[in-house]
Image (tube, rainbow, N blue to C red):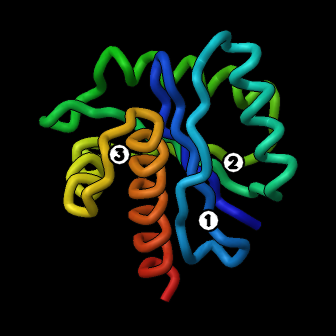
Amino acid sequence: MRVMAIDYGENRVGIALSDPLGVISQPLTTIRVKSQKALFRQILEIIQESDVGLIIIGNPLSHKGEATKMSEQISRFIKQLKKMTDIEIKLWDERFTSQYAMNIMKEMKVKKQKDLVDQVAASIMLDEYLRSSSTCTT
């Protein structure tokens, strides 16, 4: 069973997947949002093809840890996704993941590409989740 991370944005949605053992995170793709219907279709396709058993969705909290306008959009997105799948969905604090992704790419001398930033941010978020859940079970 894989864990899928979603870095939701109005224009782009970054996707990352864990390995089948749920240990290693890796960026998968960035979906350009043309319509919500097409977005959900692509996400459901990835879920089915990749044997996803858990979905982590980034919650862009404020610096103070409070919900933002985007948090409200994420909440609506989750409600719609729950209507389409029985897979467990968890919110994950994603503060600073996009900035961290840009810093990593800069250090690696990778040219800034918005699509890549989104999937790397999703991978960072997933890595944080995987590490926290492994320390909770040991």
Answer with left or right where residue 3 lies relative to residue 138: right
Q: Residue at x 41, y 54 (%)?
A: 125
Say the numbered circle drawn on residue 88.
2
- Measured as percent of width and height from the top left, residue 38 is found at 75, 18
Amino acid found under the numbered disc labelled 1: Ser
Q: Which mark is residue 87?
A: none
Secondary structure state at the residue bearing disc 3? strand
Q: Earlier in the sequence, mark 3 or mark 1?
A: 1
128, above or below 86, in the image = below
For the residues labelled 3 and 1, the Cα–Cα distance comes to 18 Å
The foreground one among 43 and 66 is 43
- Relative image position of residue 82 (x, y in whole percent): 72, 31
Label 1, label 2: how far apart the Cα atoms are? 15 Å
Q: Amino acid at mark 3?
A: Asp
**In the rendered image, which quarter contains the N terminus?**
bottom right
Query: What residue sits 49% from the left and 69% below the top?
Result: 130
Q: Residue 9 location, x and y as percent?
A: 46, 24
On screen, 108 above or below 75?
below
Residue lying at the far top of the rendered structure: 35
Compare marks 1 and 2 and give the one earlier in the sequence. Answer: 1
Instruction: Tell me the quarter of the picture where residue 62 sits.
Output: top left
Q: Nearer the viewer, mark 1 or mark 2?
A: 1
Residue that badge 3 annotates: 93
Q: CA distance from mark 3 to mark 2?
A: 17 Å
For disc 1, the neighbor class at 10 Å (few under 14, some 14 to 19, many from 20) is many
- In-image side of 95 versus 119 (left or right): left
Give, as a three-letter code, the residue at label 2: Glu
- x and y, in percent, of residue 10 in the image: 47, 17
Kindly identify the residue that appears in the image at 33 percent across and 15 percent down: 69
What residue is pinned by disc 1? 18
Near-viewer residue (125 or 100): 100
